[in-house]
Every structure is written in structure tokens, then in C-alpha cells.
Amino acid sequence: MVKGNTTGYEEGSSPLDALHQAAVNYATAITVKPNDPKPHFLLGQVLEEHYYAAEIYGLKKKQQEEAAELSTAKATGRQEEILAICKLHGIQGRPALEQQLKALDAEYHQLKDQGQSEKADYIQTLFTWKSKQAGKDMKCGAAVTDEESSFGQALMKYLDALSLNLDNWQYNFHVGRMLLLHRRNKEALTYLQEALGLRPAAAITRCYVGLALLEQDGGPSNRMEEAIVYLQQGLEHLINQLLNQSEKTQQSLGMLNAENLFSLTNAHLLQGILKMGNQQSKLSFKPSVQIQTAQNTLHIAASLAAKALCFCQYLGAITEQLEWVLLEAHYGLLELLMEEPKGKEHLIHKRCQALSALLRLTSIPACQELLDMQEKI
């Protein structure tokens, strides 16, 4: 993996320059025909592509690169301070996240008791910063949910397009898909179901409706089978596309990532396949239609994630999401193997060794979830 940048291009000829010019052109078209939904929609796709250019290929403007480097340096400095505080409280080596938080909490109260309020406030800042790493939500990347980012602006343009044409299935679909990425799951399902009603044969819409059902608070309730069937249809479409890749390659050239959602680098889609496999292993009823076994689905999710990682040229948010899919799929397979009758100890041992090796090689920043997975393995 290498750090991507815009070097190697003549001034004004990089992909980012092309995206910027496209955005300017669509914005101009909007000023000329503000009530035409198509320029709004196309501008949304171009804005979304800025996110993928940065997170898949590492293409960033110089100012963005400098800001990212500054952010990394700041994070490294804060982590060193936290480790020093851990040592003061008798915690040596590479402490777990929970231990780091406990040390910060103890330091905070100690400084408060000593009347050093300013220092205590700074420790509170470190505690807040570190505690944000405890959640699994880090997987999606802050840029996805930041309304000021190109990703957040893309959602606004999709909404503008939809407001001008409520009966367009694509506009409903993309609004629903983006809301799902912003974790506004209930709203997302409404738009995605509207898109499905307008275009019931669209495989990608059925797939995302299934994912949205699984993402609802409390799960899909009595629609579990529907969710799994929809996701399986999406998986079948993806596999068929991969089998016919030689024919599809020329067709997909020049397509934006927002257009080609059955691309392997669509981590959100692979996360949906992973969720399907995990749910299949917990089904308490016999489905009325034939579906894949949980083991097969998890094997496919792991295989697709591994292949997708080969296309990622930059260690960004997309790579991190794909690595999580790879790790969790293999971990799910390990759990299924543990439930089988005795006599599989040698297979369990081999899978534990392989998964431990994956954990050592991952580029995911250290967090409590990784430590918990390692401990269980």
C-alpha cells in the first residue's frame, strides 16, 4: 500500500481537477435550469466521487494532505501523552483501550483533588478523544457522516434532485442509500422502499432494502426472511457480474463509483453480505424459499473482501472497512466451526492460527474490539 497523492500529473490534469471541473459545469447548469433535477443528481455523484478518490486512491489536494499529516501528528502526540499517564498509574507495555481510559479517569480525579483544574480539563479532553475510539462506528469514517464533507454535500444534492422529481426511482434510491450510510436507518428504509416500488426489478435496490431492514433498530422483526432474500439476490447479481467480468470491463470504464454500486470496492455492499451471513446463522425458523447456508455466505464475504483489498491502492477508510469485513467473516466461520460436533479440533486450531496472523497484519488502528477478538481467538 502506498500513500496516494496528486503528483505525477501535469498541472490541471489530475483526476481531482477533472472532478472539480465537472462539479463547476454541473453547478453552472443548475444556475441556468434550477428546476431541472438531473444536474442536481449528477453534481451529487461528482461530489460523492471526491470521497472515493480520496479513500480508495489517496487522491487529495495538497492542503488536504497537509491537514491529514497534521492530524496524524497530533494523534500520535496525544497517544504518547496517554501512555505516559498510564505508566504513572502503574500500567506498563501496550495497555488496552479500557485500561487507558481508566488511567485517564484516575489522573483526572487526582488533578481535581489537587486543585489543578486547568490540567484536569486537558485530561478530560484526552479522555473524550480516546473514548471515541471505543465504538465500532469508527469503521465508517468520520467523512461519511460529516455534513460539510463532499459526502454530506452529495446527499444534499440527491435530496434536491428528489424534491424536483419525487417519482424517480434513482433519486429515491440514492437518497435512501446515503441516509443509510449516515445511519439514519428508519428514513433510509422509507426512500429505498419507494425506489423498490418504482423499479421492483432493480437488483441493487432490492439488495439495499434488505440491508436497510437488517439495520433497523431492533432488527427487521417479522421481515427477516425478506431481508435475507433481497440480499441474496444482490449477492447472486454481484457473482454473475464477476463471472462475466471480461464483458463488463469495457462497459464499466469511465463509470463513477456511485454509478457502479456492484463494484467490489463498495464496502457497504460487502458489509451487507456479511450481515446476511451472521443473521443466517441465527435463524430460528425454516425459510420458505431456498437460501445460502450461513457458512457459504461468510466464505463468499471473506473471499470478496480479500479480492477487493487488492484494488485498494491507499490505506484509507474504504480499506479499513474491507479489512473489518474480512476479519469478521473469518471470525464468524470460526464461531460456526466451534458449534460443530467434536473431532474438528485440528480445523479450529488452523483457523485460529490464520485469523491471528490476519490480526497481526491488519492496518486497522488498535481498538478494544480488535483486542477482544484476539483474546477470544
Image: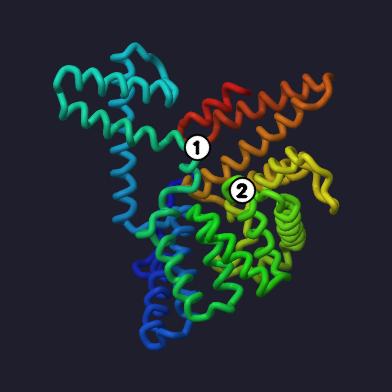
Depth check, front residue: 369 or 253: 369
- Among all residues in the image, which is located at the extreme top? 90
Q: Residue at coordinates 28% horizontally, 26% vertically from top-left?
A: 81
Residue 116 picture location, percent across and down: 15, 23
- Among all residues in the image, which is located at the extreme front? 222
Q: Is residue 43 left or right of residue 168?
A: left
Residue 321 picture location, percent across and down: 54, 45
User: Which labelled disc corresponds to residue 345?
Assistant: none
Q: On the image, numbered disc 2 is attached to which residue?
A: 271
Q: Residue at coordinates 31% horizontally, 23% vertically from top-left?
A: 105
Residue 169 picture location, percent across and down: 61, 74
| Secondary element at image label 2 | helix
Q: Residue at coordinates 28% horizontally, 44% vertically from top-left?
A: 70
Dot 2: within a 10 Å radius of its alpha carbon, few (fewer than 14), some, or many (20 or more) residues?
many
Give the alpha-carbon distance from disc 2 to disc 1, as whole Å.
18 Å
Depth check, front residue: 254 or 121: 121
Q: On the image, numbered disc 1 is attached to which residue?
A: 363
- Residue 277 sits above or below residue 373 on the image: below
Q: Earlier in the sequence, mark 2 or mark 1?
A: 2
Depth check, front residue: 51 or 242: 51
- Residue 198 sits above or below residue 337 on the image: below
Question: Looking at the image, is mark 2 or mark 1 nearer the viewer?
Answer: 2
So how many labels did they put on this image?
2
Dot 1: within a 10 Å radius of its alpha carbon, few (fewer than 14), some, or many (20 or more) residues?
few
| Secondary element at image label 1 | loop
Q: Is residue 82 left or right of residue 352?
A: left
